[in-house]
Every structure is written in C-alpha cells, then in structure tokens.
Amino acid sequence: MEGLTIRKANRKDVLNLSVLKKQVFISTYALNGINNEFSNHITENLSEDMVLKSTEDQNKLILLAEKEGFLLGCAELFLNSNCKETRNKSPELNVLYVFEHVKNKGIGYKLITESENVVKKMGYPGIWLTVYHENINAIKFYQRQSYKDIGTFQFEMKGKFYENRIMYKSFN
C-alpha cells in the first residue's frame, strides 16, 4: 500500500489501538457472534488502560501501520519470551492485526517484515507466534512468510480453551 508508514506506538495511540484490537479480535474470533465470554475478555484485556500498559512495557514493542493519520494495523512483540516448542529465548509476535477493511493490501506483510527486522537486529535466532487453528487465512499467510507449524497451544478465555497453532521462523 502506497503512503503507508510503520512506527513505534506511544501514549497518544492508545485509544485508536484499543479500538483496532477490539475490531480485529471480534471479526477473527467471535465467529458465532458475541457472548459474555467474548465481551468480558475484550472489556478486560483490550481496554485503553491495558493498551497503555502495553505501550509502556519495556519488554514489549508495538509497531503501527498508518496512512494519512489513520491506523490500519499493528504488530506487538513480546521481547523476553520463551517458545516451549523450541526451548530457546525468542521474541513472540503476540499480535499482528490489520483493520478488516484494508486486508490483503500488504499491510500485514510490512508489519511482519519490520517486526522480523527488529528481532534480527537484536540478535535472536528466530521469532514465534500462535494463531487460532480455524484462522486458515492467517496460517497460510504465515506459511508464505516461511513460518513452520511446530505445535499447539491452548488459549484460555474465561475458563474455555481454544486451540492455537505455534509457528516459528528461524533466521539461520
């Protein structure tokens, strides 16, 4: 996408980032509609306060994709993370969200590429992520970026568990 800029998030981005995360979370995971489980999770974990904490956390890096002052996507890295499947210390790409109305325009690719570049510069051997097992488009996207499926992870939300795939990309 022409005119797209990637930059680090700051305090001024919290409101828009909270709304973006809510929109993408709902459109990705609430496939059967909204219920109390989803509403409680979103209200508690994607609030402005929680997003502010993430932007101020020294162990996290949030990158934003913008065009003409509009937030279109974000990537969030957990820098001090351990992948249980590889048993090495590698950052986790915890979030890669693109606004629903601008998907398939290269925004996710630019965010993941910039995230990988940051991780490489820090000297890590690779990067990992988890992805909902029913999110076939995301899984195919990660596979095109050379991520390998290496195991499963159970995402817990309000006492219910959802299968996620663990994917890893080695820089060696």
Image: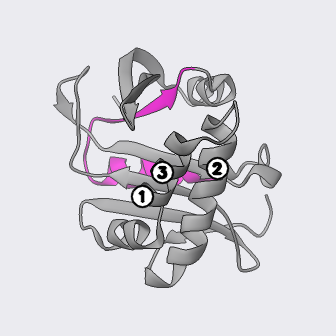
Query: Is the residue under label 1 in contact with that under label 3 (CB below 8 Å)?
Result: yes
* Residue 113 can be seen in this image: no
Residue 131 position in % (x across, y down): 50, 30
Region in magenta: 109-133
What separation in Å lies between label 2 and label 3 (alpha carbons)?
16 Å
Q: Which residue does the numbered mark 2 point to in the structure image?
A: 24
Residue 67 position in % (x across, y down): 74, 72
Q: Please state which of residues 140 and 115 is positioned toward the viewer in this rendering.
A: 140
Residue 146 position in % (x across, y down): 52, 25
Toward which corner of the image does residue 82 lie, by quadrant? top left
Labelled disc at residue 44: 1
How crowded pointer 3 is (Cα within 10 Å; few <14, some 14-19, many 20+) is rated as few
What separation in Å lies between label 2 and label 1 (alpha carbons)?
16 Å
Q: Secondary structure at mark 2?
A: helix
Q: Which residue does the numbered mark 3 point to in the structure image?
A: 40
> Which residue is depicted at the point 56% across and 76% down?
15
Q: Please state which of residues 112 and 58 is positioned toward the viewer in this rendering.
A: 58
Q: For the residue marked with disc 2, what is the amino acid?
A: Val
Labelled disc at residue 55: none
What colouring style does the render use?
A: one colour
How crowded pointer 2 is (Cα within 10 Å; few <14, some 14-19, many 20+) is rated as some
> Which residue is depicted at the point 37% across and 62% down?
61
Q: Determine if the magenta segment contains residue 130.
A: yes
How crowded pointer 1 is (Cα within 10 Å; few <14, some 14-19, many 20+) is rated as few
Toward which corner of the image does residue 33 lie, by quadrant? top right
> Which residue is depicted at the point 64% across and 30% down?
141
Q: Secondary structure at mark 3?
A: helix
